[in-house]
Amino acid sequence: MARRTLFRLVLTVAVLALLVGRHWLRPERDAAAPAASTQGAAIVPRSGERGFTLGSLAFAPCELAERGSAATTAAFCAPLRVPEDWDRPDGRRIDLHLALIRSDAPAAARDLAVLLAGGPGQAATEVYPRAAAGFAPLLRKRNLILLDQRGTGGSHPLRCREDLEGETQAAPDLDAIRAATTRCLAEVSKDADPAQYTTTATVRDLEALRQALGAPQFDLVGVSYGTRVAQQYLAAHPDGVRSVVLDSPVPNELVLGAEFASNLDAALKAQFAACTSTPACAHAFGDPYASLYRLRDELAAQPQQVAARHPRTYAAERKPLGAYGLAGLVRLFAYSPEMSALLPLVVDRALKGDFAPLVGQSELIEDEVSDIAGSGLQLSVICAEDADLLAERPQDANLLLGDLLVRVLRAQCAIWPHGTRPSGFHAPVASDAPVLILSGELDPVTPPRYGERILSGLPNGRQLVLAGQGHSVMARGCVPKLVARFVDTLDAARLDAGCIADLGPTPAFIDFNGASP
């Protein structure tokens, strides 16, 4: 791929969260007895206006835009201003973008559901319109809070231009990446101190929001990197948490970026094993795992200029594709079972000289993560919280991703300002709070063993592993209903989750008409 795509790959080093699933559950009524909550203020309508007051915040009608669509989602927004540096409250203040989605109930519970988006770099108000149907069961009884994390969306974003262009080299050009990082830093430093945009600062923002709302308890719903925020908030403010849902979780102990290469390789082996165990797929493609590595080696020796048409605009394009671009594309393909089902086919076509299907599909995937590309927040988070703990992993050198991410992160964080990491930041979470963990069996980023590790410190926790699924599973099948029932009852142990057995892997495509009958 072009250096632009390489830049997306290396800057998007944290846990990318393709939060949106394609199979939404229609809202269903369930008879689970709710666990009552009496904390927090009630919504008070403002006389003669369409808005309302909650705590000390005045909400007014607003619309949340959906990227790539003219459709909007109705919401209520309120201003929220916080110190950029919480240790210098008299210094610069920043405005955070806050929205509330009203419950369907005439009198909603006073505890509030809170979406913590992934990335780092995704904004809750931008993610929600694509994921709204997955939250429908929760909204039957609860209001939903959407707060763009500082540095994202409408919350003083640390946005950089994507200005790395040109041909992909046989190896990543660290000098070019350092130069791009320096330019990005100069750009965002005009009106921000990047050292203040960390998970810890976000936790303080969340608590300030809770107090402004009248001190309700939160029902946290964290996705991917958002699960780190949820665990850190739970440790800092346990009294503010009523329940926690961790979708595709990141253990506190994990150093972001350290295991990306090995996790991807393990997921690919498992995904391709389903093909080799199916006669029609094995006959069509042989060993897709071996084929992928053969393609990687061929592109390393001879990068290609690929002629393809954009899948949405049908505009003719020419794009360079090399080994590192391939690694980034395959990683994004592996996030969802529908996309990973195409991998044996597009790899086989590429080996036969037809790269257009691989590159064409990449355009659609890149659209899904375009809200993260160019976000300096990722560097603010990782350079403060993880970079000094990253170590070379010789065992990863020959894997598809290799040691690229570790080397790039260390180069970038030698330039980017570092915020502070509190002592105990990487300590395992320990809490009596009710916690439901959701994991995809074939997740290439946060595999189920991460959920198992987190669960060891949660006596009132439970993990559900969804067979055949990838990263971010809350919107799959019956899971939205299960999440709502768990938040109602606060009883993960007794949650009847038998319906997830209906989920399974997506069969590999034999051709572009689909899988073998």
Image (spheres, helix red, strand yellow):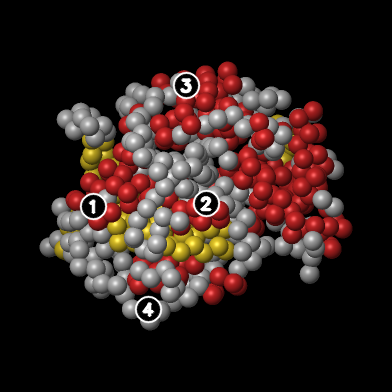
- Give amino acid for label 3: Ala
Is 430 rendered above or below residue 413? Answer: below
Q: Residue furthest left?
A: 47
Residue under pointer 2: 450
Q: Which residue is drawn at 52% across and 26% down?
A: 410
Point out the tag, 4 or 3, that comes first from the N-terminus.
4
Q: Find the distance from the CA under tag 4 to the CA under tag 1.
A: 27 Å
- Give amino acid for label 2: Tyr
Q: Find the distance from the CA under tag 3 to the CA under tag 1.
A: 35 Å
> Badge 2: few (under 14), some or many (20 or more) residues near its Cα, within 10 Å?
some
Residue under pointer 1: 210
Residue under pointer 3: 414
Asked which secondary structure carries label 3, the reply is loop
Q: Residue at x 44, y 73 (%)?
A: 495
> Badge 3: few (under 14), some or many (20 or more) residues near its Cα, within 10 Å?
some
Asked which secondary structure carries label 2, the reply is helix
Is 483 rendered above or below residue 400? Answer: below
Q: Residue at x 54, y 75 (%)?
A: 498
> Badge 1: few (under 14), some or many (20 or more) residues near its Cα, within 10 Å?
some
- Give amino acid for label 4: Ala
Point out the tag, 4 or 2, that comes first from the N-terminus.
4
Asked which secondary structure carries label 1, the reply is helix
| Percent of width and height locating residue 414 | 47, 21
Q: Find the distance from the CA under tag 4 to the CA under tag 2.
A: 29 Å
Q: Residue at x 51, y 64 (%)?
A: 464
Asked which secondary structure carries label 4, the reply is loop
Residue under pointer 4: 32
The answer to which quarter of the image holds residue 37 is: bottom left
The answer to which quarter of the image holds residue 330 is: top right
The answer to which quarter of the image holds residue 142 is: bottom left
- Give amino acid for label 1: Arg
Nearer to us: label 3 or label 1: 3
